[in-house]
Image (cartoon, grey):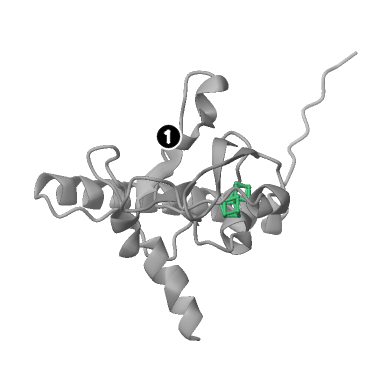
């Protein structure tokens, strides 16, 4: 059987589409190159044009309202402010708080013998802080909770305690501002 060659004439619209696609690719390459050279120049002259935090050498300063991991407020006498009422444990939607209360001869009468938070389950929602009647658990600015094992993400009372002085200018400042509204 004889071979027949057929010359296909592409419609004009299809050829125009090809040209448009080629133009779009070239335009994309031009934009990528423009950003690349501009950012490289900014890097060389030490005037960066990109907002990249060089963690861990650099860290962002978070606003007071920032909700990082929850921590326990440590009073000036070194003890926790928590009275082990269990409201935060009850309010926590992920059930990541575990409290074992005990009695004390102090004025507050109760304290948490055990206060654990499983940070692998905490979602930084802040409901524990909302529920606490004692301002004893507040959100902090810390989000560095990585660990090499699941057990390592279980934070105990001693890990959670933060002196009240360190919280006064950050989250506690934000919480107390709410009282005045
Ligand atoms: S921040 Fe939310 S999830 Fe985390 S311990 Fe508090 S209530 Fe639970
Ligand atoms: S709600 Fe506050 S006082 Fe009650 S157990 Fe939780 S942290 Fe302690």
* Residue occupying the far bottom of the picture: 181
Quarter the N terminus occupies = top right
Q: Nearer the viewer, residue 178 or 10?
A: 178
Give the x, y percent position of residue 168.
33, 63
Q: Is residue 74 left or right of residue 90?
A: left
Q: Is residue 43 above or below residue 171?
A: above
* Residue occupying the far top of the picture: 1
Residue occupied by mark 1: 158
Q: Is residue 24 above or below residue 176?
A: above
Give the x, y percent position of residue 142.
40, 46
- Going 24% across and 44% down the picture, which residue do you hit? 58
Q: Nearer the viewer, residue 39 or 113?
A: 113
Q: Nearer the viewer, residue 7 or 111?
A: 111
Q: Is residue 114 left or right of residue 144?
A: right
- Going 53% across and 61% down the picture, which residue do you hit? 134
Marks counted in the figure total 1
Residue 118 visible from this viewpoint: no
Q: Is residue 90 above or below residue 113?
A: below
Residue 5 visible from this viewpoint: yes
* Residue occupying the far front of the picture: 105
Q: Is residue 41 left or right of residue 174?
A: left
- Tell me if mark 1 has few (under 14), some (14-19) or many (20+) residues whose alpha carbon lies within 10 angstroms of its own: few
Q: Nearer the viewer, residue 131 or 42?
A: 131
Give the x, y percent position of residue 4.
82, 25
Disc 1 within 8 angstroms of ligand 2 (CB): no
- Going 72% across and 46% down the picture, which residue do you hit? 9
Q: Secondary structure at mark 1?
A: helix
* Residue occupying the far right of the picture: 1
Q: Is residue 134 left or right of residue 61?
A: right
Give the x, y percent position of residue 141.
39, 52
Residue 129 lies in quadrant: bottom right
């Amino acid at each position: 059987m004889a071979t027949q060659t057929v010359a296909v004439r592409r419609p004009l619209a299809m050829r125009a589409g090809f040209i448009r696609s080629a133009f779009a690719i070239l335009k994309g390459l031009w934009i990528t190159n423009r950003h690349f050279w501009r950012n490289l120049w900014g890097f060389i002259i030490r005037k960066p044009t990109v907002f990249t935090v060089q963690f861990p050498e650099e860290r962002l300063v978070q606003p007071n309202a920032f909700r990082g991991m929850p921590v326990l407020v440590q009073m000036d006498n070194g003890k926790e402010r928590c009275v082990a009422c269990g409201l935060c444990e009850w309010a926590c939607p992920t059930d990541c708080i575990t409290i074992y209360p005990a009695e004390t001869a102090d004025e507050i009468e109760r304290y948490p013998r055990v206060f654990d938070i499983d940070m692998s389950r905490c979602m930084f929602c802040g409901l524990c802080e909302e529920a606490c009647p004692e301002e004893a658990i507040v959100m902090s600015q810390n989000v560095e909770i990585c660990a090499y094992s699941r057990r390592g993400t279980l934070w105990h009372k001693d890990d959670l305690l933060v002196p009240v002085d360190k919280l006064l200018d950050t989250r506690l400042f934000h919480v107390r501002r709410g009282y005045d509204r």
